[in-house]
Every structure is written in C-alpha cells, then in structure tokens.
Amino acid sequence: MPEGEVVHTAGKINPVKTCQPIGAMYAALGIHRCLPHSHGSQGCCAYHRMHLTRHFRDPVLASTSSFTEGASVFGGAANLKTAIKNVFEIYKPDIIAVHTTCLSETIGDDLPTIIKQSEVPEGKVVIHANTPSYQGSHITGFSNMVKAMVTYLAARDEETIRKKRVNIIPGFVNPSDMREIKRITSSLGVDMIMFPDTTNVLDSPLTAKYDMYPEGGTTVEEIRDTGNSRLTLALGAWSSNAAGAALMEKCGVPCVPLKVPIGLKATDDLIMTLKEKFDAVVPDDLTLERGQVVDTLIDTHFHYQGKKVAIYGDPDIVVPLVEFVLTMGMIPKYVITGTPGKAFEEQVGAMIEEAGIEDYIVKAEGDLFDLHQWIKEESVDLLIGNTYGKYIARTEDIPLVRVGFPILDRAVHPLMPITGYKGCLRLIEMISNALLERRDRDCLDEDYELVL
C-alpha cells in the first residue's frame, strides 16, 4: 500500500465482486436436472466452476462451447449448436441454461436465433442469459439468469384460479440460507415455490452413489407454474427484483420487494409480509426464536456496542448487514460494494444517518484498495466481508468476520445460515467472539479475565 492517497479512475484493485457468468452459473444450478453451459472458452468455464467449487466445497458441473481461434473470429454458432446436441445426448439434462462470456458478447453472437436453430429433443428446454463480464458483477449475472427463467418458462394458465401460494426469489445466498427461508415460510403454513433453489444441490449429503443431478433444485414445471401464484417475494433488490418485475409483467403476479432476511428487522419484514398477505398465524416457535435474539442482544451488547466496523461485499447482503449492526449499536464506518448502482449509496447512507452517525463513507462500484486507504487514515475495530479482505485484516491487524461470497479459506459456512432469527444468533456469535478473542490477545496480564 503506497503512502498517501492514490486516486485510480480506471480499473479495479482487489475488486469486491467477480464476473457475471459465475452468478448465472450459480442460479442455473438451482434448477433441477439443469446443466449450466458457458458460451465461450474453456478457460472461462473452468475458472467459474472452480470458484463456485471452492466456496461450496461441492463439485460444480457445467459444459462449454470451447471457443478456439476460429470461433473467436467467425462466431460461436456452430460450437453452441454442436454443444447443445452433444450435451442432451450424453449428459441427458432436462434443461440447459446458456450464459455468455466477454468473448461471445464481443463477437455479438445472437443466442436466441442460434438456440431456435439447434436440435433440442422434445420435452427438453434451452434458456439463455446475456452475461458480459465487463459489465455489472456476479450479482448482475445471477439476476439476468433468474429473469431468463421467468422469460422462457413462466406461464399463466388463464383457466386456473390463482393458487394460494408465494413465489420466493431468494437472491444470491448460500443453500443453508435458502433452507432457512423455506423453513420459516413452511412454519407459517404458506405454500411456496422457491426459484432458484440450490438446497440439496450444493449442500447435498455424501452417499455411496454418484448422481450427476442431485435431487434438489426447482423443477421446470414448478417454474412454469409460478405464473399461477398469488404473490412473489423478491429478496434482494439487485439479484431478485428484475425477475419479480418480469413475472408481474408477463403473468400479472404481484411482486413485493424485500431485503434478504439478514438481521432482526429484515426477518420481521419477511414474516409480517407473509402473515399479512396469506392470513398466516405466526407460530410460537418463531416467536420464541425472535425472543432469543432480543435476549442475546441484551446479554452481549457490551462486547460490540460502539465498535467501528467496515462492511464490504454483495449489495443484497451488505444492506441488511448494515441494518443489523446498527441494531447492535455498532458504527458502520466504511461500507462498500463492487456491484454498480447508486441506489446502494442512497439506501445505506439513509440508514446510517437515521441512526445519527455522521462520519462515514459508503461507496458503490468501489474496490478493496479504496477501503484499505480509508482504514490507513482511520482504522476500525472489525471487518465483515468475504475472504478477499484477509490481506487488509493481516496488514492492519484487524479481526475479520467472514460473511458473503466467496469464502475460500474457511469450512462449513455454506451449511450455516445467516438468514432468519437463527442467522441473527450466528452473526452475533461470530462478531462477539471475534472481538473477545482480540481482547484476550491484546490485554495486559492483570486484565486477562476468565469471564468476559
């Protein structure tokens, strides 16, 4: 890190994002018996599979158009047509979800036309999303692929009375978070279709039998039927709102945008929306869990009250995280995301100012180089974000709580939810313990206490 402020207007240094195809590939894995297909070079596909595999520690399968010099010059239509034919013959998926790369986007391949000209077996489906890596982020790619699911598949059966059921678009979250959101919805007695749904796909148990397509994921038929639901909940503005809006326009299903239910208020909002829209009764178990969170906040507040924190990562994760740390009495000093969108700065800034905090920095489309410079000027007590912040944590000797995507250097996290009331308890535990461990490490011998 050089001395003094360095302003860079071109490019990113240690970005707080990765490229669109990774998000599109992750979304596609949430469809049952779907094989994601990368329309580009083998290198792109290998990198995207590897990144997801390292985060989830489960195998990620995807095919590729395998561009070489010829396809790069003359276009990849022939490669994609051959790939679609071969993939259906050899791997027998129900659906192929094609996403583009920088290369195929720059060439200008017309995917809808290529797909129409391809040999697609009867009863099988091919969908696509445009995901140029030089725009947006992996969250944009996730959003584009989920919207493509609606555009290609969702349908409204005019003869069917709308089913008393909610569509839930969960956002780019871990399978454990999707599982927790489904548990909460089920406990309220509300029927649902979640799409995409990577539970039992990227957190599937080890068995003695290899299954190329795990039992999880939303079926094509279920996604088609989302057009007959009564309501859609889009969790996370950047990753889910576009699909929710498309479903409303195509099939007339009303959409309620909400935050990803991270923290007390965001979880309350999810539950109260379901209660209001479906006349649901909140079960005692959920009331008990909420009470445990409030009790824990009171019991532990002196561990983190007034501590300054820097939060970085995906906007749909960072926004409710900021809301929750404010609930905890912490001070979000620096907040940053790599995904474009000035709404991020407005939304986060409004929350912080409402809490009476004046000295803070919020930035969309920023990078960790910016964050490191700010910390050099005035440090914080804690970092919350993905693995890429570990270099700042080590250099500046600040504890890091790993939350978000990707987490490449810790285990088990994809199985541990940060959503819902159970997620609140986990976040309180991680934040409290990180600060307590720092205190134990740094304090004088005479201040070293058994009970903190």
Image: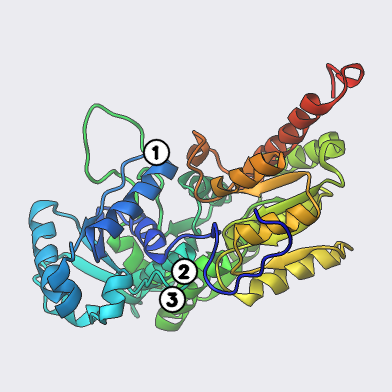
Query: Residue 12: which disc?
Result: none
Residue at figure coordinates x 7%, y 56% from the top left: 89
Q: Which residue is mark 1?
A: 57
Neighbour class for label 3 at 10 Å: few (<14), some, many (≥20)? many
Q: What is the three-letter code of the residue carrying label 2?
A: Thr
Neighbour class for label 2 at 10 Å: few (<14), some, many (≥20)? many
Q: Distance between the Cα atoms at labels 3 and 2?
A: 18 Å
Q: Is residue 173 above or below residue 355?
A: above
Q: Position of residue 160 (x, y in %)?
A: 36, 74
Is 190 in front, or is 290? 290
Which numbered disc flags the more N-terminal residue, 3 or 1?
A: 1
- Which callout, 3 or 2, points to the residue nearer the camera? 2
Q: Position of residue 169 (x, y in %)?
A: 48, 62
Residue at figure coordinates x 30%, y 44% from the top left: 215
Which numbered disc flags the more N-terminal residue, 3 or 2?
A: 2
Q: Position of residue 172 (x, y in %)?
A: 49, 57
Task: Determine the secondary structure under disc 3.
Answer: helix
Q: Which residue is mark 3?
A: 247
Query: Residue 140: which disc?
Result: 2
Task: Determine the secondary structure under disc 1.
Answer: loop
Q: What is the three-letter code of the residue carrying label 1?
A: Arg
- Position of the C terminus, as image quadrant, is top right
Location of residue 268 (image quadrant)? bottom right
Is 173 in front, or is 261? 173
Neighbour class for label 1 at 10 Å: few (<14), some, many (≥20)? some
Which numbered disc flags the more N-terminal residue, 2 or 1?
A: 1
